[in-house]
Image (spheres, rainbow, N blue to C red):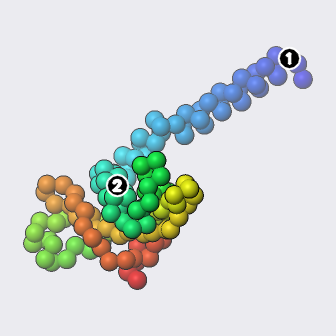
Amino acid sequence: MSLERSVIRILAVAGLSLSVLSACSSGGGDAAASDDPNVALRPLIAQWSKDIEATHSACSAKVEGKGCQDFQVTCKAEHAVGAADAQRGVTAQVIAAMTFAGRNPDGSTGKSGSSFALFSKAADGWTRGEAMPVNLQTCAPV
């Protein structure tokens, strides 16, 4: 194989690699985020994890100011809007489950926990309320 062909192949592979990487960059993620029908819940979910850390017993031991770690929303699912909620102006509901782990005083992973929330959308935006426990993977009632 000639030197010229080798250089062309190397440049082609490099160009393809850059194309693949750019598709995975934050720019590509923004387009995917706009496809998420529940993107407006992100700030509420972030606040939910802060509230859990401030109040849940698994988060009581603080290490460097943090009481819990590994917050993960394990499921989000549409929830049927009941008649009473619809009369109050609720147009959509999403149930979600979040898991997390406490921290031991030595910094190691401590007690695990989970929390459940019902997000309701009305004319003034989304709000978060308490929810009964659900299956952590499917959000189906337990």
Kindly identify the residue that appears in the image at 48 percent across and 56 percent down.
69
Q: Is residue 21 above or below residue 106?
A: above
Neighbourhood count class around disc 1 (C-alpha, 10 Å): few under 14, some 14–19, many 20 upward: few
Extreme residue in the front direction? 105
**Disc 2 residue type (three-letter):** Lys
- Give 2 or 55, whichever is nearer the viewer: 55
Extreme residue in the bottom direction? 142
**Disc 1 residue type (three-letter):** Leu
Question: Quadrant where the C terminus lies?
Answer: bottom left
Residue 126's spot in the image, x, y percent? Answer: 22, 57
- Give 114 or 134, whichever is nearer the viewer: 114
Kindly identify the residue that appears in the image at 38 percent across and 80 percent down.
141
Depth check, mark 2 against mark 1: the one in front is: 2
Query: Can residue 37 be seen at all in this image of the molecule?
Result: no
Q: Is residue 20 above or below residue 106?
A: above
- Secondary structure at numbered mark 1: helix
Q: Is 118 left or right of 88, judged from the image as shown?
A: right
- Give 35 or 79, whichever is nearer the viewer: 79
> Which residue position holds label 1?
3
Extreme residue in the left direction? 87
